[in-house]
């Protein structure tokens, strides 16, 4: 699915739910930007500024979706 709303996923290398989420998005053909907090300290700072300390976090428009929540992701994308 192609969407004009940017999808941003905050993840880490060791997060199993992050891997599941990225696989789900890829399988659904949903383009996303990955922001891996293990490889870029600025992404960790962004995550902290969002007031979140767990991963994954998906940003879609104004929606901040915590964890592997496909129902909320579909809703935020109008699916």
Image: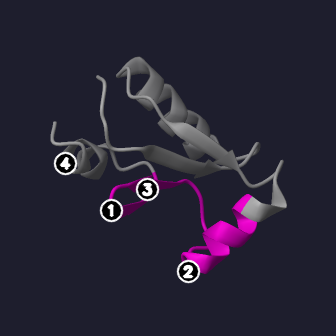
For mark 2, give the secondary structure: loop
Q: Is residue 55 magenta?
A: yes
What range is drawn magenta here? 43-67
| Mark linked to residue 59 | 3
**Mark earlier in primary sequence (4, 2):** 2
**Mark earlier in primary sequence (2, 1):** 2
Which residue is the extreme one toward the left? 78
| Quadrant of res 5 | top left
| Quadrant of res 66 | bottom left
| Mark linked to residue 51 | 2
**Mark earlier in primary sequence (2, 3):** 2
**Mark earlier in primary sequence (3, 4):** 3
CB-based contact (under 8 Å), mark 3 and mark 1: yes
Circle 3 residues within 10 Å: few <14, some 14–19, many ≥20? some
Instruction: Tell which tag, 3 or 4, sits nearer the viewer.
Output: 3
Residue 78 placed where, x, y %?
Answer: 16, 42
CB-based contact (under 8 Å), mark 2 and mark 1: no
CB-based contact (under 8 Å), mark 3 and mark 4: no
């Amino acid at each position: 699915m192609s969407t004009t709303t940017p999808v941003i996923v905050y993840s880490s290398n060791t997060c199993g739910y992050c891997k599941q989420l990225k696989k789900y998005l890829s399988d659904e053909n949903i383009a996303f930007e990955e922001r891996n907090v293990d490889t870029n300290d600025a992404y960790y700072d962004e995550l902290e500024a969002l007031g979140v300390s767990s991963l994954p976090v998906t940003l879609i428009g104004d929606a901040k979706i915590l964890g592997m929540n496909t129902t909320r992701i579909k809703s935020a994308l109008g699916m």
